[in-house]
Image (cartoon, coloured by chain):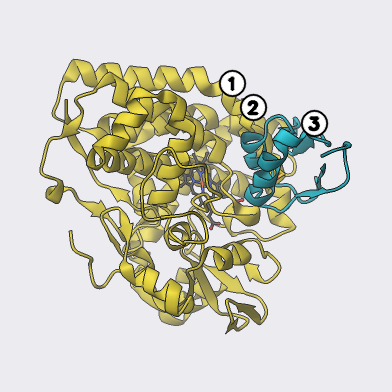
Chain colours: A yellow, B cyan
Amino acid sequence: MSEVADVPVHMRRTAFDPTDELARRRAAAPVSRVTATMGQVRFPTWLVTRYDDVRAVLSDAVSFSNANEAVRAHVAAALGEETAARVELGGPSLLSYDPPRHTWLRRLVAPTFTVKRMYRLRHRVEAIVAEHLDAMEVKGGPIDLVEAFALPVPSLVICELLGVPYDDRAGFQRRGEAQLDLELDFAERRAVEEESRAYMAELVRRNRAHPGDNLLGTLVRDHGDELPDEELVSLGILLLVGGHETTANMLALGTLLLLRHPDQLALLRDDPGIADRAVEELMRYLSIVHTGIIRTAVKDVTIGGTVIKAGDAVAVSLPSANRDEAITDDPDVLDLTREPTSHVAFGHGNHHCLGAPLARLEMRVAFPALLRRFPGLRLAVPFEEIEFRSLSVVYGLQSLPVTW
Amino acid sequence: MRVDADRDVCIGAGNCVLTAPEVFDQAADGLVDVIDPEPAPHLEQSVRDAVVRCPSGAITVGGPGRPGS
Ligand code: HEM
Ligand code: SF4
């Protein structure tokens, strides 16, 4: 489980921890150069490592654009313009829009993801979690926790919310994983993107004809005129992939982390009252999204004393920011009872995670329920055999064999 | 303490509602609604946390507000 040398610095981790190199840069060179990877293309980008600087970049939508211009330019130089049009997950959407377009679209979907709406979903999430735990109990260990629990729970939740048939999961789970894979070359990426768009276009078509009682249906009913099909397709893909891959990896990686810290695991199992702050601490500690979208500076701007030129690519390290002394005392210690921090694991600024209230709800329900149902939960293979997934937008586990 | 929130800036992330539910809510459009613009002193720390956790910088606090706070 040693660090892999050709993984870019901002994605290098040893199991749960960001590489020491990030701590060194935070101290000595808080804004420095790294080489980023996308498919077969390598390109230079700035890497911002300190908490305050990361927040400064993410909250400055005037100086930093999400429109992928810098990445697109590097890919175009290497592989041509047509290929460069494929750098966004699912096509241009919320995540790659800048204001005012971003503000417009974000406001159309915000009502669906409010904290209160999520409280109303709680019973349904509890039922989905219980069903999957029942199935695990019937089947008996050892089983792969990713396949039996971590992936299906958030997949089913986002399917119901969005209006995607859960029976189609084999296809969209495979495509979602591929779309987040930074090693995937551009020919394969293009094929997967086209498959995804064709799939989502069919769902949009069905909702145009008979708007369902779900997010796609609501958007068609309330904003059908403003939202062309292309827009609905891109947004649908973003929500579908963002809605299951992230939470799934948090559930799997978080469970493994707890199994390695039995005292912390016992705290959460024996006192579900700490679930809310435990989830915030797991989010901070694991920071599964390495950087989010690589921003493009649209004008010369100084961050942490370093001048960044217009047109430069800028990546912010979320794990590094969340392990900065500026955020909390002893940031490298996992403490589920810690006062909630203002971590940036869901990002910051105008692109702060739309699904954060949903992801929080899912994790607050799922972790305590899993630990209480199987108090003897343990790894079914030696820890050293667990494979971590590094070269992906979202850090996580391929599988997690457990028994009880 | 006097609490204000700029609905033109808010992105509806709900961090404020999770941090200080006594003071913030989200209206039907998902955007912030300050339900207690002059919170009692024991709520002031959670309001300050909400200011820091608000991703869009929509929340501002100032004085005076209710006497003694
Ligand atoms: C633990 C789970 C999750 C984590 C760690 C996470 C992380 C993030 C991060 C870091 C960003 C900001 C990216 C950037 O600024 O470049 C983001 C944005 C986003 N997330 Fe999540 N997310 C999670 C769950 C979800 C869920 C469940 C959904 C869908 C329902 C979702 C949908 C989105 C969307 C649509 C955006 C783009 C928002 C915008 O551009 O305005 N996420 N997420
Ligand atoms: S935390 Fe900020 S952006 Fe989010 S709902 Fe509250 S005021 Fe709006």
Work out whether residue A6 or residue B46 is closer to the camera in this orientation and state it. Answer: B46
Q: Are marks 1 and 2 in contact (CB under 8 Å)?
A: yes
Q: Amino acid at mark 1?
A: Arg
Per the image, label 3 sits on a secondary structure element best described as: loop
Tell me the quadrant of ligand 2: top right
Q: Residues within 10 Å of mark 2 (few under 14, many from 20)?
A: some
Please give the name of the residue rendered at 31% of the width and 25% of the height, measured from the top-left corner.
A370
Relative to A349, residue A156 above or below: above
Q: Which residue is mark 1?
A: A120
Q: Which mark is residue A279?
A: none
Query: Which tag is nearer the camera, tag 2 or tag 3?
Result: 3
* Residue A306 in the image, given as x and y percentages of width and height: 57, 82
Q: Quadrant of the C terminus of chain A?
A: top left
- In front: A127, or A182? A127
Mark 3 = which residue? B35
Residue annotated with mark 2: A116
Which residue appears at 58% of the width and 28% of the height?
A: A118
Q: Residue at x 67, y 79 (%)?
A: A299
> What is the quadrant of residue A187 in the picture?
bottom left
Work out how far the residue at label 1 is from the one at label 2, CA to CA, in angstroms: 7 Å
Spatial CA span between label 1 and label 3: 20 Å
Give the SS element for disc 1. Answer: helix
Please report the residue visible at 45 percent of the width from the left and 70 percent of the height from the top: A83
Q: Quadrant of the N terminus of chain A?
A: bottom left
Number of callouts:
3
